[in-house]
Image: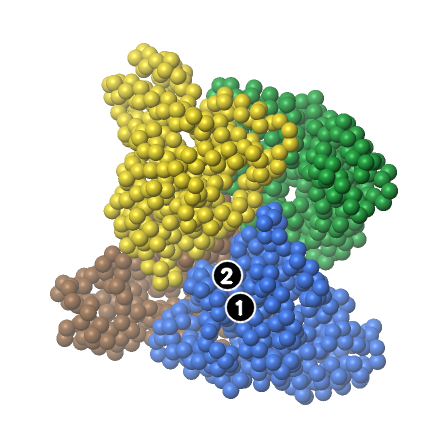
Chain colours: A yellow, B green, C brown, D blue
Amino acid sequence: MDFSSDTSAPAHPLVIEAIAAANIGNAPSYGGDAIHLRVRKLLTDALATDDFDVWLCSSGTASNALALSVMCPPTGAILCHAEAHIERDERGAPEFFTGGGKLRLLPGDDAKIEAQALRSALAGIDRSFVHETPADVLSLTNLTESGTAYSAAQIAEYAARAQQAGLTVHLDGARLANALVSTGASLAEMSWKAGVDVLTLGLTKTGAIGCEMIILFGEMRRKYAELQARAKRSGHMPAKMRFLAAQAEALFEDDLWLQLAGQANARASELAAHLTAHPGAELAYPVQGNEVFAVLPDGLAQRLDDNGAKFYPWPGGSHRFVCSWQTSSEQIKRFASALKTT
Amino acid sequence: MDFSSDTSAPAHPLVIEAIAAANIGNAPSYGGDAIHLRVRKLLTDALATDDFDVWLCSSGTASNALALSVMCPPTGAILCHAEAHIERDERGAPEFFTGGGKLRLLPGDDAKIEAQALRSALAGIDRSFVHETPADVLSLTNLTESGTAYSAAQIAEYAARAQQAGLTVHLDGARLANALVSTGASLAEMSWKAGVDVLTLGLTKTGAIGCEMIILFGEMRRKYAELQARAKRSGHMPAKMRFLAAQAEALFEDDLWLQLAGQANARASELAAHLTAHPGAELAYPVQGNEVFAVLPDGLAQRLDDNGAKFYPWPGGSHRFVCSWQTSSEQIKRFASALKTT
Amino acid sequence: MDFSSDTSAPAHPLVIEAIAAANIGNAPSYGGDAIHLRVRKLLTDALATDDFDVWLCSSGTASNALALSVMCPPTGAILCHAEAHIERDERGAPEFFTGGGKLRLLPGDDAKIEAQALRSALAGIDRSFVHETPADVLSLTNLTESGTAYSAAQIAEYAARAQQAGLTVHLDGARLANALVSTGASLAEMSWKAGVDVLTLGLTKTGAIGCEMIILFGEMRRKYAELQARAKRSGHMPAKMRFLAAQAEALFEDDLWLQLAGQANARASELAAHLTAHPGAELAYPVQGNEVFAVLPDGLAQRLDDNGAKFYPWPGGSHRFVCSWQTSSEQIKRFASALKTT
Amino acid sequence: MDFSSDTSAPAHPLVIEAIAAANIGNAPSYGGDAIHLRVRKLLTDALATDDFDVWLCSSGTASNALALSVMCPPTGAILCHAEAHIERDERGAPEFFTGGGKLRLLPGDDAKIEAQALRSALAGIDRSFVHETPADVLSLTNLTESGTAYSAAQIAEYAARAQQAGLTVHLDGARLANALVSTGASLAEMSWKAGVDVLTLGLTKTGAIGCEMIILFGEMRRKYAELQARAKRSGHMPAKMRFLAAQAEALFEDDLWLQLAGQANARASELAAHLTAHPGAELAYPVQGNEVFAVLPDGLAQRLDDNGAKFYPWPGGSHRFVCSWQTSSEQIKRFASALKTT
C-alpha cells in the first residue's frame, strides 16, 4: 500500500526488456542509433504530425529547464502557477538554465491558473519599459500539482491569449498521460493543436526508469540545435542514448503509456471513492488523474499509517495519495479495509 | 571491428541483470534505497577509507562540471591541460556550472601537464590582484585525452604543489579503471592518498549504461549538501536513483570494473603491437590504457576502413582506436589480418 | 514643478565642486586614493563603529545585486516584499548576479512585509528538503516602494527572526536618508545595531550624480574580497574611483545627505497637505519620506499636468509625486495654486 | 613623472566643465536627455554614417562584456589574443555576462593575433559537432595590450575572414583614439568600414572620468533592445545618464579626444627615444600609441624609481610606461635627465 509517489514504483517490465534488448552490439553514441528512428516514427503517429523535433532526457527537471532555456532569454520571465513544479520543486533549475530568467507566479484554485489573473498579467506587459522584466513564456502544467487536469480547450484558450501578447507556450507534462486519459484528449489535441510550442512529455512517472521528451513544434524547431548544445553542456546528452530511446519505444508501442496511465487513474478513482465514503474525509481537489488529495479527519492519517499505508502530508493540510501503473485493485481493497478497521 | 569508442559498446550483461533485479517493488526515490547503501560499502572497501561522500550521476560531463562547481567560485579559474576533456569536449559545461569560472590551459606532451608549466602557473598566482582571475582548482585527467596515464606518484606530486598554492585538486577519471590497471595503483593510491580532493570516477566507458561517481574526500565533504543542491538543480537527481546504484554495484562487485578495464587494455596492447609491426605505422602516444593513437602510412586508414574497421581520425594527424570490455581477441585477430591484406 | 523622480534632479553643487576638486594630479586607480580614506573616516563616525567594509558603486541596481550575490548562493533564495525594487525594477539583476538565486515574495500593506507572512515563510524553510529552494537572505527596503518607512525597531525585530532561522539580512537603502530623517533613527540604529548584515546605502537620489555604498558589517566582512572580485567582474570597479569617493565625501561632510533628505521630506509633507486638502484627493500610503502617493479625483491628474506639474501614474490607481533636495517651497506653492485653480 | 597608467590621470578640465554645465535643472532619467541627442549627432559625423546605435557606459570592462553578451551565446566562444584585456584583466567579465561563453586564445607577436593562427582557428570550426564549443565572435583590441596598433587594413582582412566563417567582429577600443592617431585611420575606416560589427570605444583613458561607448553597426542594431536590457540588469543604466553624455560631448567636440590622444602619443614617442638612447635599454614592442614597453638594463628601473619615476614591471620582463593627455614635455625632459643621471 505504497501511495507515496509514482516515482517510487518500479519501471514496467517491458521497459526493462527493451533495455536488455537494446544492449546488443555496438551502436552510434549520442542519438545516432536505430531505436531513435523508431521512436520518431511512433511519435509522429501519436502526434499526427511530423512538424516537430524531439530530444530525449532522463530527467524531468532538466527537461523542463532545457525547454524553458530555449524559450526565455536571461532578461525575460516565465508566467506559471504559484504552485507549479518548476517554481516549487526544481531548486531553481529554470533560473539556472535560462541564465537568470524570472518566474512570475499566478494564482488559481486547484493549481490551475485563473483566467483573470492570466489576462491581467498579459495586459500588464510593457516591453518598452526596460526596468521591469517582461514575460516571454507561459508555462502550464498538466496534470497540475494538485492532480487536476486542464482540458485541451482551456490550454488552447490560454495559449492563444499568451501568443497574442507575444509569448510562447510551454506545457510541463510530467504526468501528461494521466491528463490525456482523464480528459479524453489526444496527444495532438493537448499539444500542438492547442498551440503548445514546446512540450515536456514525461514517461518516468508513467512507467520508465527515467525518460522524458522535449518536443519542439513548428517555429520552435529552429531552436533545436541550441537545445542540443544546451543539453550537451548540462550533461543531458548521454553517450549511450539508445537506452533512453529503448524506454520510449517500449512505452509508445501499442500506446502502453496511455494504458498504464489509465490503470493508475482508475485506481486513484477507486481510492478516492473509498476515502470520500469515510466519515469526515473529503477531497481537497477534484481527482482528474492518478493523484488523490484528501483532507482527513483527526487521527485517520496516523491509523492508516499504522496499517501500512504510505502517503505524504501536503502543504495546506491535506494528504496526497499517488497511484502508479503498478498499484493493484488488491492494494486498493486492502486500503479500503484499513479505512474501515481504523 | 568497431574501435570507434568505448561509449559505442553495450553495457556488460551483469549491469543489465542488476537493473532488472533492482526493478522489484517500490523503493524510496532520490537515493534513499538499499542499493545505495551497498554501493557505499563496496566503495569504502575499494577506497580503504570511509572519509568520503559520493553522488551517482548518469553523465560524465555533468559529473565533472558538478565536481568543479563546488570547487571553483564564479570568480575563479581551473588549471587543466589544453587538451583536457573539460576544455575540449564538454561544450562549456564547467563554465556553465561554475557560473562563469575560467579554464586556464597548460601545455605538455601526451596530454599530460608539464611539470614546469604547472610550477609557473602556480607561481604566477597573485590573489591580491583583483583584475586577474586566480586559479582555485587543478584538474587532472587520467587516462588523459591521449590515452596516457599519470602515475599515482605524479598525481601526488602535482597535487602537493597545487595545494601549497591554495588550490584544490580534481581528478577526471572517466577512464580511471584503465589507468589503475595500467599503472598498478590502487584506487586509494590514485585518489585521496595522492591528495585528490574530488574524484570523478567513470563507469560508463568501462561497462555501465551511464553511471559515474562524484566522490568528495576529507575537507571537501562539507560541500556535499551544496553538491546535492546543484545536482538537483541541474537535473542530475533522478527520481529512480536505484537504477544508477544498481549499475555501480554490479561493476564494483568482485572488482568487475577493473577486470573489464584489464581486458580492454590487453586488447589495446595487442592492437598496438599489430599496428607497430606494420611498415610505416607508428604510435602517436604511448599506449597506457585502452586507447591506441597511431600515425598511419598513406592509404592505410582507407584500406582498414574498406575492410570493416571503424575508428576515427584525430586532431594532429593520427588515428584513434579504442578497445572496450567487449572487444574480443577474435576482433583483434581479424584486425591483424586486415592489416596484412591491405 | 517636476515631481517625476528624485533621479531627475541635478546633483548638489557641493558634489560637483568635490568632483572638480578631486580632478587634480594623478591618483592611484581602483580605490587606492586619499579621498577613499577620508570617506571611511566619515563613515566610521556616522556608523559609530569601524567593524565594516565599504565598496562604492555608481549604480543602485548593481549595489543591491552585488550585495545579494555575496549573501545568497545560486541554489538559494531571498525573501522580499512583492513590490520590492529588487523584484520589480531591476530587470532580474539579483538573479543575474547570484547566478540564478530566487526571490520569494511576501505580502504586506504599504509595501512593508507583514510580520505574519515573514513568520510563515521562515517557519516553512526545510533545509533538508533538497527539491525546494530555501531562503538564505531577508531583504528589506527602507524607504519602501510606497514611500513608507520601517522603524529601526521593526527592522531589528525582523532581522532577529530571520537570523534565528539562519538567514542574513540585507537593507536596500536607496532612500535611506529619507527614512532616517523621518523616523529619527541614527544610521547605526537603522543598520548594524538593528542586525543588518549588509547595507546598500544610496546617495544618488539624495544628491549625488551616481554614488551608492555597499557596507558589510561584522561577520560579513569576510566576504569583502569576494565582493571586490564580483565588482570588478561586473564592471563596477571604475579606474578613476576617486570621483565616486569625492561624491560620498561631499555628502557626508557635515551630514549634508541628511540635511538634503530633510528638505525633500519637508517638501513632500507640504505637498501632501495641499493634496489632502483638495476635495476628493486622498493619500494612498502614509507619507514617511520624500514621496507622496495620492488617489486623485477624476480629471485632477490631467488638470495638474496641464498646469505644468510632472508626476507619474502608479500601479494600483494612485499617482506618485517625488520631492528632491532641489524641490523648493516656491514649487510647492505653485503646485498648491495649480491645485486650487483646477 | 607618473607613467603608471593613463587611468591615474585626472579628467580633462573641459570634461569637468561639461559635467558642471549639465547639472542644471531636472532632466529625464535613463538617457532621455538633450545631451544624448547632441552626442549622437557628433558621433554620426565622426562615424560618417547614422546606421548605428550607441549605449554609454562608465566602465570599460562592462562595455566589452555587454558588447560580447549580445554577440556570443552561452554555448559559444570568442576568439581573442592570449594577452587580450578581456582574457587577462577583466576577472571573467565576458564569461559572466555571456552566461558562460568561452574565450579561445590565439597567439601572435606584439599582442596582435597571428594571421595563420586565426586562419587555423576559423578552419577548425565544426558547427555540427555539438561537443566542442564553436567560435561565434572574433574580438580584436586596438591598441593592443602591448601598445601596438592594428592598421585598418589588417582589421578589415581579419574581419572578412571571420565573417566568412560565420563570426561577428568586436573591436575593444579602450585606447582606440591612440590607434587612430598613430595609424592615421579615421574612426569610420577603423570600425564599420573595416567590418567591425560592435565597437567598444573608450574615452576614460583618453580624458574622461569614466565614459565608454558601445556602438552597434548595421545588422547588429537589432540587438539594441537586448543590450539595453542587459545594461539595466547589470547596473549599467545609471539614472542620471546625462553626466555620461556630457563627458562624451566634451571629448567629441572639435575632436578633443583625438587631440588629447595625439599629445599622449607624442610624449610616448619622446619617452621612447630617450629610453632607446640609453645604453642597454631597448623597446620590447614597437611604440604605436601612448605606451612604451622597454627592457631595461640591470638596476635602471630601481634608479628611475629612486628619481621619482612611476611605472610598472610587466609580465615577460619589460617595464611599461604610459603617457596620458596630461603628460607634459616637461615631464619627459625630467625623465630624460633622470635617465642620464642614473
Give the position of the N terminus of chain C as an image quadrant: bottom left
Query: Label 1 is found on which chain of the structure?
Result: D
Q: x, y (%) of residue C303?
A: 18, 71
Amino acid type indicated by mark 2: Val
**Left or right, A182 with reference to D12:** left
Labels 2 and 1 touching (C-beta < 8 A): yes
Residue, x 68% and y 74% (percent of image)? Answer: D148
Between C133 and A275, the one lying in front of the other is: A275
**Left or right, C165 with reference to D313:** left
Closer to the chain start, of discs 2 and 1, is 2
Residue under label 2, please give it.
Answer: D70
Query: Which numbered dot is residue D198?
Result: 1
Amino acid type indicated by mark 1: Val
Measure the alpha-carbon separation of dots 2 and 1: 9 Å
Between C138 and B314, the one lying in front of the other is: B314
Residue, x 28% and y 54% (percent of image)? Answer: A123
- Check disc 2 and report its element: helix, strand or loop: loop
**Left or right, A236 with reference to A85:** right
Residue, x 54% and y 73% (percent of image)? Answer: D192
Answer few, some or many: residues within 10 Å of disc 2's Cα (few below 14, many 20 plus, some between 14 and 19).
Answer: some
Between D273 and B180, the one lying in front of the other is: B180
Q: In this orientation, does residue C123 appear?
A: no
Query: Label 2 is found on which chain of the structure?
Result: D
Residue, x 53% and y 45% (percent of image)? Answer: A228
Q: x, y (%) of residue A200?
A: 43, 39
